[in-house]
Amino acid sequence: MKRIGVLTSGGDSPGMNAAIRSVVRKAIYHDIEAYGIYYGYNGLIDGNIEKLELGSVGDIIHLGGTMLYTARSEDFKTLEGQKKAIEQLEKFGIDGLVVIGGDGSFQGAQKLVEHGYPAVGVPGTIDNDISGTDFTIGFDTALNTVIDAIDKIRDTATSHERTYVVEVMGRDAGDIALWSGLADGAETILIPEEDYDMNEVVERLKRGHDRGKKHSIIIVAEGVGSGFDIGNEIKEKANLETRVTVLGHIQRGGRPTATDRVLASRLGAKAVELLLNGEEGKMVGIEENKLTSHRIEDAISRKHTIDKEMYKLSKELSI
Ligand code: ATP
């Protein structure tokens, strides 16, 4: 292997830059040239590719977003697009590719593998929804952003004795809601993986109110439904002053936490090692604080699950 390419794809996440830096520097450390592909799979198809040096990835470890930019590419979902992408990789003499992204990006990487091209995956998404790793790059930063926002909401909720509904990201995965809810002592956490009974939510709120609680915070993962709809329902049924905050895209941005920078550095370097060892078609992960790898094919066919014990604990602690 003489040349390795790296791209970021799908939703951006804080720590992607640290992962790019790690891939590039680990490659150069092993006397391998590193190439950056801009705008995800679109850039691959268009040949938007540039050689990266040690200095190209200097001063980015602390930055959110991705210096390679990202995209959602419909063209790459077609066989024609995939063939064009491989032609570009061959034209630039790139022998292996590191794809940093979420579940969809891994599906794309798997297509390359099926066409016989060596690709490996690095899990980068704030959702923490990839099977085969305990944590994805960006989750810790997003979680801390949410916690910071909820701490502020809690101040005003207490001052006005209000109930606050906070909608957080997570279309299919409730990890951001569950972890932030547990970290912030939310009264109720609604996640897509678990059914809920609105009457029980209202009863819990009323019980808290009756024992003199000054505020209540309800975290809703976006996949459960609109925070505004849930807020209205609570207002009607519980007859409590209710306000709704949708945190939205602030959850995607910001400086990566130390945890995400370290995770990204470890996973990026491990991905290069996999390519050098001929272990293509795999994704890197972290499980019980050990670096691991799994076939991308297996990772995308298994659904990420939430920690049921944590969900149970969140209920026990908010009686
Ligand atoms: P996040 O979950 O953080 O948004 P993601 O990687 O899951 O990230 P997607 O938009 O699902 O984001 O996927 C990113 C890109 O991966 C798609 O725009 C497409 O180019 C490629 N991709 C997704 N699914 C496939 C597929 N089945 N075949 C080929 N390419 C795919």
Image (cartoon, rainbow, N blue to C red):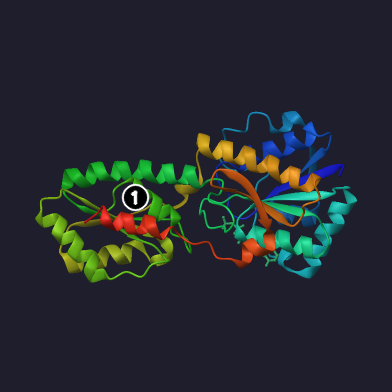
> Where does residue 243 sit, x and y in percent of width and height?
25, 55
Front residue (pair 276, 79): 276
The answer to whether residue 116 is visible is yes
Nearest the eye: 174 or 317: 317
Q: Quadrant of the N terminus?
A: top right
137 with respect to 87 (left or right): left
Instruction: Please tell me which residue is depicted at 63% across the width and 29% down the height of the picture.
Output: 59
Q: Is residue 256 visible?
A: no
Q: Is residue 215 above or below residue 202?
A: above
Residue 209: x percent and y percent?
Answer: 13, 55
Which residue shows up at 43% across the image and 53% down it? 176
Question: Horizontal and vertical percent for residue 131?
Answer: 57, 59
Q: Quadrant of ligand 1?
A: bottom right
Residue ID at (19%, 50%): 215
**Would the CB of label 1 be found within 8 Å of ligand 1?**
no
> What amino acid is at disc 1?
Leu
Asked if residue 69 is positioned above or below residue 301 in the image, the reply reads: above
Query: Nearest the camera: 213 or 311?
Result: 311
Residue 122 in percent (x, y) is at 65, 49
Q: Which residue is at 43% across, 59% downward?
A: 174
Pick the residue in front: 124 or 252.
124
Q: Quick one: SS at disc 1?
A: helix
The total of numbered circles placed on residues is: 1
The image quarter containing residue 147 is: top left
Quadrant assignment for the C terminus: bottom left
- Relative to 143, 48 lies left or right: right
Q: Could you say which quadrant of the image residue 14 lies in?
A: top right
Q: Residues within 10 Å of mark 1 (few under 14, many from 20)?
A: many
| In this view, 148 is above or below 207 | above
Q: Which residue is mark 1?
A: 182
